[in-house]
Amino acid sequence: MQTRLISTQDSQAFSLAIKILEQGGLVAFPTDTVYGLAAHIQNTSGIELLYEAKQRAPSKAIAVLMSSSDDLSQVASEIPTQARRLAEHFWPG
């Protein structure tokens, strides 16, 4: 796998990061305190690569970040009414 540094000043940075994720690659990004490492939730090879890079046991979950409560159905088959209400009230946070 090729490592590539993309400047946040590059107008194509976001599009390129999405392309990398969709193709099963990983993207590192800065947060307030540490760097995050991301894979596309719907790309199995990307998820496997993320576990490998983090040297994480397959039995341990990895956080899934979503932009809104509307995205919950992408990762859960059932969403209890109470959970939906809490998500709608507190999202994001």
Image: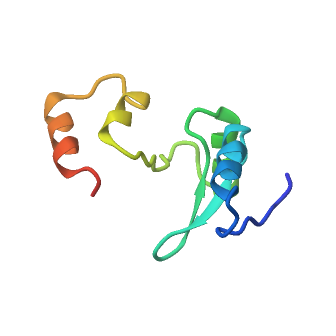
Q: Considering depth in this image, is 13 or 27 the residue closer to the camera?
A: 13
On the rendered structure, is 61 left or right of 4? left
Where residue 14 sits in the image (x, y, percent)? 63, 54
Image height check: is 26 above or below 73?
Answer: below
Asked if residue 32 lies left or right of residue 11, the reply is left
Q: Which corner quadrant of the image does residue 86 belong to? A: top left
* Residue at x 46% of width, y 75% of height: 32
Expressed as whole percent of the image width and height from the top left, the position of residue 91 reads 26, 50
Kindly tell me whether residue 55 is visible in this rendering: no
The image shows residue 49, relative to residue 70, as above or below, that is below
The residue lying toward the viewer, choosing from 69 and 51, is 69
Q: Position of residue 10 (x, y in %)?
A: 70, 64
> Farthest bottom residue?
33
Q: Residue at x 61, y 46 (%)?
A: 39
- Quadrant where the C terminus sits is bottom left
Q: Is residue 18 visible?
A: yes
In the picture as drawn, the residue positioned furthest to the top comes out as 77
Q: Coloring scheme of the render? A: rainbow
Residue at 66% in and 49% down? 15
| Most distant residue in the right direction | 2
Left or right, 56 with respect to 66, comes to right
Instruction: Tell whether 5 sits left or right of 35.
Output: right
Q: Please, is residue 62 above or below residue 71 in the view?
A: below
